[in-house]
Image (cartoon, helix red, strand yellow):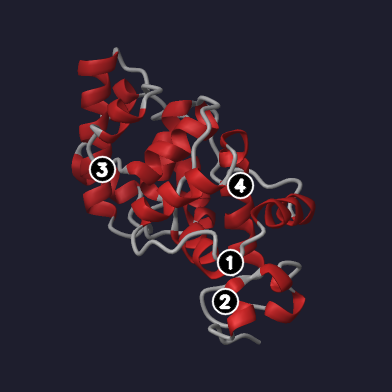
Amino acid sequence: MRIATGRILNILAEAYPDAKCALLHETPFELLVATILSAQCTDERVNMITPRLFPRYASPEQMLALSDDELADIIRDCGLFRAKAKNILATCQALIERHGGRVPGRMGDLVALPGVGRKTANVVLANAFGVPAIAVDTHVFRVARRLGLAQGDTPEKVELELRRRIPRKSWSQAHHWLIWHGRRICHAKWPECPHCPLRDFCLAYRTGSVQYK
């Protein structure tokens, strides 16, 4: 079954013209920390937590004034808060020791930081440095596979497939479109297929492999 990638992207662009990163931030460092916090946590909750953290602790040096327990207490309403506190402080130390306290703009340098995987690195590259990137979170993973844009069974495989299928200039925006579509219509449980502008192009809908409202 042929997948109309170009048509899918055009429809997503029309449906979500204002799609952008939902994490509140002003600097690459704030975005890095917010993205680490967002693992297994909603962006909405992260945006409730970061105002308690920034701007008082808005640099690696300032953040390192906190102990593991002090940072964990600030972010405690975020999932896995103790592990995240430990990783954030370790990352702050690494930023100072390896990068002069600045967030690097290269994938290899980012994924070498504690608690930073490809998804987090891609979010930072795309939104802080304007580097074309596709961050595969749960929404992108689910929506891309349902549409037929990817078949991989891991985020890494799906990212590779999307990079091959989507023009490089559209990678970052397509990432936001897929996230917004997953949040608004293509839910994990009971997607709203009858109201979806992509239903005629969606592999899961056309093959009847998804249960919907």
Q: Is residue 146 above or below residue 53?
A: below
- Quarter of image, res 103: top left
Who comes first in sequence, dot 4 or dot 3? 3
Looking at the picture, tell me which residue is in the foreground, 206 or 36.
206
Query: What label sits on residue 147 in the rendered view?
Result: 1
Mark 3 vs mark 2, foreground winner is: 2
Question: Which residue: 38% across, 61% down?
Answer: 152
| Dot 4: element | helix
Who comes first in sequence, dot 3 or dot 1? 3
The residue that disc 2 covers is: 204
Who comes first in sequence, dot 3 or dot 2? 3
The residue that disc 4 covers is: 174
The residue that disc 3 covers is: 115
- Quarter of image, res 198: bottom right
Q: Residue 150 in the image: state x and y as whole percent.
A: 48, 60
The answer to whether residue 66 is visible is: no
Check contact, mark 2 vs mark 1: CB within 8 A.
Answer: yes
Check contact, mark 3 vs mark 1: CB within 8 A.
Answer: no
Check contact, mark 4 vs mark 3: CB within 8 A.
Answer: no
Q: Residue 76 in the image: state x and y as whole percent.
A: 33, 55
Q: Marks 2 and 4, Cα distance to the nearest angstrom?
A: 19 Å
Query: Which kind of residue does numbered mark 3 sit on?
Result: Gly
